[in-house]
Image (spheres, rainbow, N blue to C red):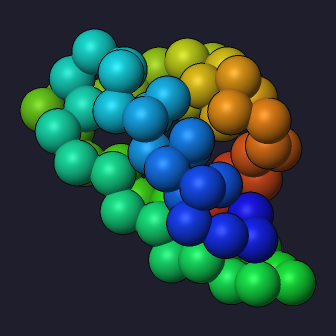
């Protein structure tokens, strides 16, 4: 992601996921931006990946 429009696209797609309550993006121009999704329960990883793909980006999962 490189701009606020990119952030908006990803935020809107992830915000549509059932159970998602908040989406925060730490934009890193020229690098990997960090996206944090808060939810009322566990989100389906495939649904998260599909939402990010729908916004036009690739998902690199971070283990916790």
**Image spot of residue 61 (x, y percent):** 69, 51
**Image spot of residue 58 (x, y percent):** 83, 44
Q: Which residue does the image show at 36% across and 62% down from the upper left?
A: 24
How many numbered marks does the figure carry? Answer: 0
**Image spot of residue 45 (x, y percent):** 56, 27
Q: Is residue 52 above or below residue 64?
A: above
Q: As drawn, is 52 to the left or to the right of 58? A: left
Q: Which residue does the image show at 70% across and 23% down from the upper left?
A: 54
> Can residue 29 be seen in the rendering of this structure?
yes
**Image spot of residue 4 (x, y percent):** 56, 66
Q: Which residue does the image show at 28% across and 15% down from the upper left?
A: 18
Which residue is at the front of the view, 11 or 20? Answer: 11
> Can residue 34 be seen in the rendering of this structure?
no
- Res 46 → quadrant: top right
- Quadrant where the N terminus lies? bottom right
Q: As drawn, is 31 to the left or to the right of 23? A: right
Q: As drawn, is 34 to the left or to the right of 20? A: right
Q: In this view, does 62 lie above or below 46?
A: below
- Res 56 → quadrant: top right
Q: Which residue lies furthest to the front in this view?
A: 5
Which residue is at the front of the view, 41 or 37? Answer: 37
Q: Which residue does the image show at 87% across and 84% down from the upper left?
A: 30
């Amino acid at each position: 992601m490189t701009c606020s429009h990119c952030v908006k696209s990803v935020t809107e797609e992830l915000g549509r996921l059932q159970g998602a309550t908040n989406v925060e993006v730490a934009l890193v121009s020229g690098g990997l931006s960090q996206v944090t999704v808060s939810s009322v329960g566990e989100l389906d990883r495939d649904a998260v990946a599909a939402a990010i793909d729908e916004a036009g980006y690739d998902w690199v999962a971070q283990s916790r």
